[in-house]
Image (cartoon, rainbow, N blue to C red):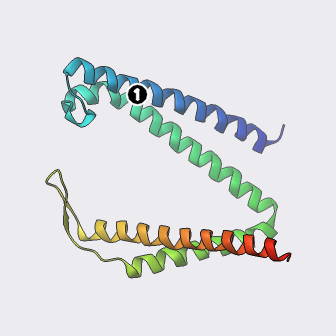
Amino acid sequence: MKLSKILSYVVLGVGILGAILWYVMSSSISDLMDQNGVSEARELPLDVAESSVSPLYSLTLIIFIVTIVATLFTVISTLLKNPSGLKNTAIGVVAFLIVVGIGFAMANGVETPLKDGDVLSASGSKWVGTGLYAFYVLAAVAVGLMFFSGIKKLIGK
């Protein structure tokens, strides 16, 4: 059996395990909320929530990291076996980095007070703005390409 097929099954199994753990963690939080008489999870005392959820969260985080590493390993091994695909991947990565760079240049970094009394730093604000601008550009490109493809099919090439 090929390594990529084995890794696909491993990733599938880890995904199912992650979904189960997410369900267990969610029901655990619901039970804690009922026991403490609160309506939102953020109202739970930190020591109560941490003792119940922390081990499941840590396990979920480990599974997430293992899944990312396995996925990256599969993608990189596939790219190394097919060097022609490497060029297309590099073009896509560079285009994405250019979009993020444009978003970063357009974003403003302003210290912002949050609802809970904390303050979002200017750097954090700039990165949030960068993500929003990059999302807007990528969404506009996707919609434009779908629109262009639809018109092209209507015209008939």
- Say if 140 sits above or below 15 in the image: below
Residue at left 78%, top 40%? 5
- Picture quarter with the C terminus: bottom right
- Picture quarter with the N terminus: top right
In terms of depth relative to the viewer, which is nearer, 121 or 80?
121
- Say if 130 sits above or below 35 in the image: below
Q: Residue furthest top?
A: 35
Amino acid, disc 1: Met
Horizontal and vertical percent position of residue 74? 70, 50
Q: Quadrant of residue 141?
A: bottom right
In terms of depth relative to the viewer, which is nearer, 139 or 48?
139
Name the residue beneath numbered marker 1. 25
Horizontal and vertical percent position of residue 68? 57, 48
Image check: 61 left or right of 73?
left
Rate crowding at label 1 as few (under 14), some (14 to 19) or many (20 or more) other CA atoms within 10 Å: some
Q: Quadrant of residue 142?
A: bottom right
Count how many numbered circles sit on residues in the image.
Answer: 1
User: Which secondary structure lies at badge 1?
Assistant: helix
Q: Quadrant of residue 145?
A: bottom right
Q: Residue furthest front?
A: 154
- Say if 90 sits above or below 41 in the image: below
